[in-house]
Image: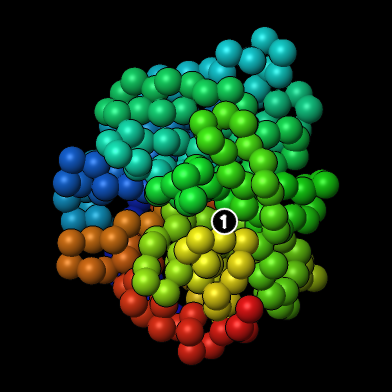
Amino acid sequence: MLLKRHQANPIIAPEDMPFACYTVMNAGATLFKGKVLLLLRVETLERKTAFHVATSDDGIHFEVCPDAINYPLSYTEERTNPAHRFDMRITEIEGVYYVCHAAWIGYGCCIGMATTEDFINFKPMPYLSEPMNRNAVLFPEKINGLYARLDRPQTNTESGEIWVSYSPDLEFWGRSLPVQLPTMPWSGKKKGSGCIPVKTDKGWLEVYHATAKTCSSENYYLGVCLLDLEDPSKIIAAPTDMILAAQEPYECMGQTPNVVFTGGGVVMPDGTYNIYYGGADTRMCLAQTTVQELVDFCLAGSIEA
């Protein structure tokens, strides 16, 4: 497969954390002050979710802050009663970091967002969707004067496809259209955006997750596509081959078997594209490639729009 697992995998496991915990997984990723920063989803031994910042000079060896971030509640909390937040994505736009995440509330799963400039202080924004919606990924620049995001609206927890929506102010969203990726045996159950889209001269490069049912589990895979720069609901190229599947013990054994789930990638100074992913909803892992390799793969093995 195209993505190459790092030999140090898993790069962060529960036993590596500076405190006792059950899992560490599904981190958002970005560059911050010259370092790779991960916003880790951590489950305590009570199975309560907290978020911890981890930083690294080389993108492989991380120092984890033992104190959880003080992540704010939305001002609508008294009416929506959020019980669970998870799976951060981080987009930097002009020095401001926008953190999107899923939030289970009394009515289902919604999209939440907060902004930060230091990963210490976070400013909440209103919930940005009705139930059910999740896997929100904000594009790193405006498209035709509007903010744009990918997400996964769904009628229930068993299915869902990637959509693109637009906003003038990051609060009111519309002009929504589906991204009609090919459905393959490895992607027939659901598809959701993963990494922050990377702008290339061939289109927006997006690494996404997809799932398929087997006789014993619902397996997760990673795929990749190129979306039109001016209208990312249009597919430039979408290979029918997966780029990563759960095969290693640290991906197949854990809280949720057979899962590779990415919430972010970072293009390193040497051109390596580090894709950070959760293994079996239990530990953090790293796979590597380059943006150009992914673009070439898309164009060589694609279904043309």
Q: Amino acid at mark 1?
A: Ser
Residue 75 seen by the camera? yes
In this view of the protein, which residue sits in the foreground, 117 or 286?
Answer: 117
Residue ID at (61%, 83%): 304
Quadrant of residue 215 in the image? bottom right
Q: Residues within 10 Å of mark 1 (few under 14, many from 20)?
A: many
Direction right: furthest residue: 155
SS at mark 1 in the image = strand
Q: Is residue 284 above or below residue 74?
A: below
Q: Badge 1 is on which residue?
A: 193
State left or right for residue 289 relative to residue 134.
left
Residue ID at (76%, 24%): 106
Quadrant of residue 269 in the image? bottom left
> Residue 111 at what x, y percent from top left?
62, 35
> Residue 43 at what x, y percent from top left?
51, 35
Give the position of the C terminus as an image quadrant. Answer: bottom right
Direction front: furthest residue: 144
In this view of the protein, which residue sits in the foreground, 69 or 155?
Answer: 155
Residue 224 seen by the camera? no
Quadrant of residue 94 in the image? top left
Residue ID at (75%, 70%): 188
Q: Is residue 133 above or below residue 164?
A: above
> Residue 197 at what x, y percent from top left?
45, 58
> Residue 126 at what x, y percent from top left?
58, 23
Residue ID at (70%, 26%): 105
State left or right for residue 25 relative to residue 191.
left
Number of callouts: 1
State left or right for residue 196 relative to residue 241.
left
